Image: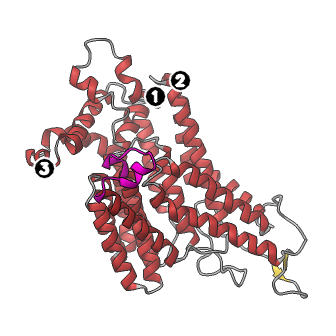
Amino acid sequence: MAGGGASTSDRPLSARDAGAARLGERVAYAIAAAVPLLLIYLREVTDAAAVAAALALILAAHRAGRLGDVVATARRAPSTPLGVAVLALLALLATSVAWSLAPERGAERVAHMVGVTVLAVGAVAAASVGTVRAGARAVGLALGLAAIVLIAEHHTGAYLRGVLGLRTEIHQLNRGAVAIALFLPLAVALLARDRRWLSAALLIVLCWVAVMRLTSESAKLALVVCAVVAPASLLAPRFTRGALAALVGLGMLLVPLAAGLVETYLPDVVHRIVGPSSIGIRAEIWSAFAHYAWERPLFGYGVEGAHGFVAAMPAGVLSEREAFLMSLSHPHNAPLQVLFELGLVGAVLSGVVIWLGVRAIPPMPRVMEAAALSSVAGFHAVAVVSHGAWQSWFYSLGVLLALLFVSTRGRNSRGGGPSDASAAFPLITDRARDTRTATASSPRKFRRP
């Protein structure tokens, strides 16, 4: 076996081991598919779900005798261009703790980001050598159920959340809405692949109603962005991929530059429609952070510097309004936070990581590629208008979605060899093949040459 991992063995793979491996993969993908529903009630569930799914996939690889393949695949990740760029960004992030305005919190965020990165590499490597595909029916039903529950909770004032002893403010449902918007392209693509056109149409309508009736502008924006990018990718996949890679990569510099102008040029009608608690106050937050970001343009204020900025400023430097706006944890704009805390160096590195990441998405059937690109665009849109740069729950959500996409390119579970969906995500693998051959005594048992 490639990599010579601990799972290499000459013993035949029994039907029991093969069945256990398939069960482990199904459990992992069931966890990933259930996350939009779970987020309606458990706002921090994605980290735990990503760990559980990764462990299930790794244990499945072990039972199937493929752990060596997983290790070999993961080891190749740091040597790829994307791997080198990610390591450089993590090194800068860790080093910035030395000049961070909130060093303890910054060190915690560095640990989270390193953990998410290792988890993503291990989980995707394990999924890439699996044999089970995520089913269109299972993913579609899970997402449809999440949309129905979200609609019910919205109309009942989060009644079930109250019964469970959870907070009942409607904005507590926003993370579930974001997950529904970002998972929708994959679910629709899977249903379209299986020619379940009516089911796909019904799911789109259901999710659209669920998301658009909430107060989450982030989820609404993600849904609209996905709806625009998906057909564009279907019509011109190569152009869309290149344009998206360039746009989101350069966005790490362009978004912070534009952030300071949003408050000035945002039309008054927008303020009146959305109110001061939404886009209006965010525009003010962006303007305040953008103004002070250029006082340390190269390396910024250090990881989580946004959190400690107000306390670190001498009295009288910030106006009362600025102090209030900049005390709200982070800029609610990931590219702006990267520039503020890691400077231009960090912004450029982040842009390179995103550009390489989008370009590294492997060739897929056109409908699946359109879904992948639209989800990437949706994630970026949410990060620009809502989330902090180091929120691990959001990255873990991306890991879970990536696992489902990887599973659509899994090996042929019946033949044991590579199918047209082999070599999931070549950014960390070089098309590892299953070299096992059937034994003469039993076609259900395999041994390695």
Q: Residues within 10 Å of mark 1 (few under 14, many from 20)?
A: many
Question: Mark 1 belongs to which amino acid?
Answer: Gly
Please give left or right for residue 356 compared with residue 431 in the image: left
- Residue 345 position (above or below residue 126): above
Q: Earlier in the sequence, mark 1 or mark 3?
A: 3
Q: Which residue is mark 2?
A: 98
- Disc nearest the viewer among 2 and 3: 3
Q: What residue is pinned by disc 1?
A: 302
Q: Is residue 132 left or right of residue 210?
A: right
In the rendered image, which quarter contains the C terminus?
Answer: bottom right
Distance of label 1 from label 3 (alpha carbons): 36 Å
Callout 3: few (<14), some (14-19), or many (20+) C-alpha neighbours within 10 Å? few
The residue labelled by disc 3 is 273
Determine the residue positioned at 63% across, 55% down. 52
Q: How far across and how far down the image is residue 446, in percent?
A: 83, 79
Are the two marked residues, 2 and 1, in contact with CB atoms closer than 8 angstroms? Answer: yes
Q: Is residue 100 above or below residue 212?
A: above
387 over 437 or under it: above or below: above
| Segment tinted magenta in the rendering | 155-173
> In this view of the protein, can residue 96 be seen by the observer?
no
Which residue appears at 58% of the width and 50% of the height? 48
Distance between the Cα atoms at labels 2 and 3?
43 Å
Q: Which mark is residue 96?
A: none
Q: Say what secondary structure mark 2 lies in.
A: helix
Q: Are marks 2 and 3 in contact (CB under 8 Å)?
A: no
x and y, in percent, of residue 333 in the image: 34, 42
Amino acid type at circle 3 is: Ile
Real-space CA distance between mark 2 and mark 1, rounded to the nearest whole angstrom: 7 Å
